[in-house]
Image (cartoon, grey):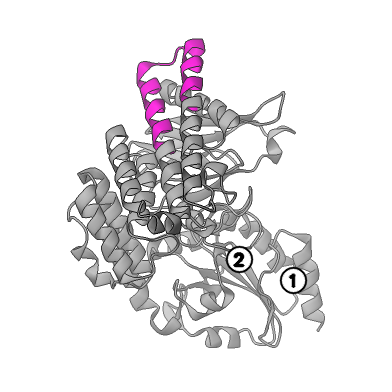
Amino acid sequence: MPRVYKLILFLSFLNLVSCTGNSGKESGNAMDVSSHKKPTTSPTIKLVLGIKDDKIKHLDLNFIMHDSLFFGTPFKLSDTLSIDLMSNNSFLILSDKNQIPIKVSAGDSIYFTASEVTGSIVVRSSNKQNNEFIQFIHEVTRKYGALFPFILDLPSQQRKVNVASNIILVEKEINKLKQDRLEFLKVYNENYSMSDIVFEELQRFIELATINDYIILYQNNRRLLEASNLLTSKLIDVSSNAKKIGFQGSFPYYFVYSNLVDLAANIPDFLDSKAKFDNSIAYINKHVDAETKDFLLSRYTYRAIMNDIISLDQSSKYVEQGMPYSNFLKKKVIMLANKQQLLANDNYFNIKSNKSLLLKNILDAHKGKVILVDFWASWCQPCIAEFPNSNELLEKFSDKEFSILYFSIDQDLDNWKHAVEKYKLNKGNSYLVGENNKFIKELQLKSIPRYVLIDKHGGISDANAPRPGSKEILSKISSLLKN
């Protein structure tokens, strides 16, 4: 499975402090533009960052959370934060080199501190059983590596091989890794006496991680398996084993089955054709249990809409009406339809005038000025964290020909409007833009926050400008103002 595939599935981080989509190369705490935090009245959890002493204040705590038709919403923890859950139980993924899953349930408080000895991250849950789960996952991950890896580096047990016979050798490695993890679980349980429920849950978690390793191994070596007429039998094996394990309705189960559907439908990277979409829907309808089917049908339908494979009004043909995720899909389709209608012909909708304008008209209104364009969204915490710095820039250059344009990629109009009010952004310079906007495509916008500097003559001076809080941006703006 190519590395890009893993990024798409998991909205993974390009580095330990950056969260990007697809293949973006922007640095910093950038949020994937294809993801957003769903406003909801669902159960909540609380994340609490420990005392910001010399050890913990340097920690970069970035996460993704399974809470939508994507595999995760990326966010950064800089203080105490309450977040909503899609269901009563979910998973956060700590996006560091260990990629540790953190099991959470409604009402939990999760505490993050730093070890006084090593300075490494320590995680504790107020939920006793979830805490047992988290502590073991920490230990087994440190010893044997990530169970559901998604950072760029491909684990050895998922690697490509040169000849089909070597796939058998890697399968043995995967099975050995599973046995080592299960034996470690057994010894750990003897020492710490975890509850039977957690012990059984961790066994299934390890089993599912093993199946996922097999699936990605087969995807990475698809051509060899097809040439040897082995792909079909491998697909049957992993599908059968996944059904036996259970763990339905959870992040790992959905993740494994999405990888499985991609393997069956020959989607190694992007869902890029109607044929592949049809194959994925057919496989889901034939082989997947009801609860997981709702998620997968809704997910693949949404992917097809976003990739212009089917139209918005065709979505109801592919999902089971009245199910939780299909209802969520319906809401997202309505939001997309409203936004596409509002932003037809690459218009930019202004919150103050309540009108849509072309980009040329917006720039003409700031002719002769240096402009910093800020791409952001209401769900992007790193974007929001830079707003005070933007205000400082405006104050510093208040007597100069300098402006900041705020271009939001939000899908929900109310969320966008609320955020503009809450963070006191300049309404006259705040615009909502479409995801398929020509300017966004030209910039190859993959992640936010993203900043673009435009000179006095209307030309792009820096398409990947430094953040408002950086020292570099001051010198760049000053230089452009002199020219």
Q: Which mark is residue 397?
A: 1
Spatial CA distance of label 1 from label 2 is: 21 Å
Q: Secondary structure at mark 2?
A: strand
Image coordinates for residue 341, horizontal then vertical, percent:
33, 77
Q: Residue at x 63, y 51 (%)?
A: 15
Camera-nearest residue between 326 and 169: 169
Query: In this orientation, does residue 279 appear?
Result: yes
Image coordinates for residue 442, horizontal then vertical, percent:
56, 78
The residue identified by callout 2 is: 450
How packed mark 1 is, by other alpha carbons closer than 10 Å (few <14, some 14-19, many 20 or more), is some
Quarter of the rendering containing residue 28? bottom right
Q: Residue at x 56, y 48 (%)?
A: 154
Q: Is residue 338 left or right of residue 190?
A: left
First reached walking from the N terminus: tag 1 or tag 2: 1
Q: Is residue 105 above or below residue 476?
A: above
Camera-nearest residue between 151 and 126: 151
> What segment carries the magenta color?
181-209
Q: Is residue 179 above or below residue 367?
A: above
Quarter of the rendering containing residue 434? bottom left
Image coordinates for residue 218, horizontal then vertical, percent:
43, 50
What amino acid is at disc 1? Answer: Phe
Image coordinates for residue 166, horizontal then vertical, percent:
51, 46
Q: Secondary structure at mark 1?
A: loop
What amino acid is at disc 2? Answer: Arg
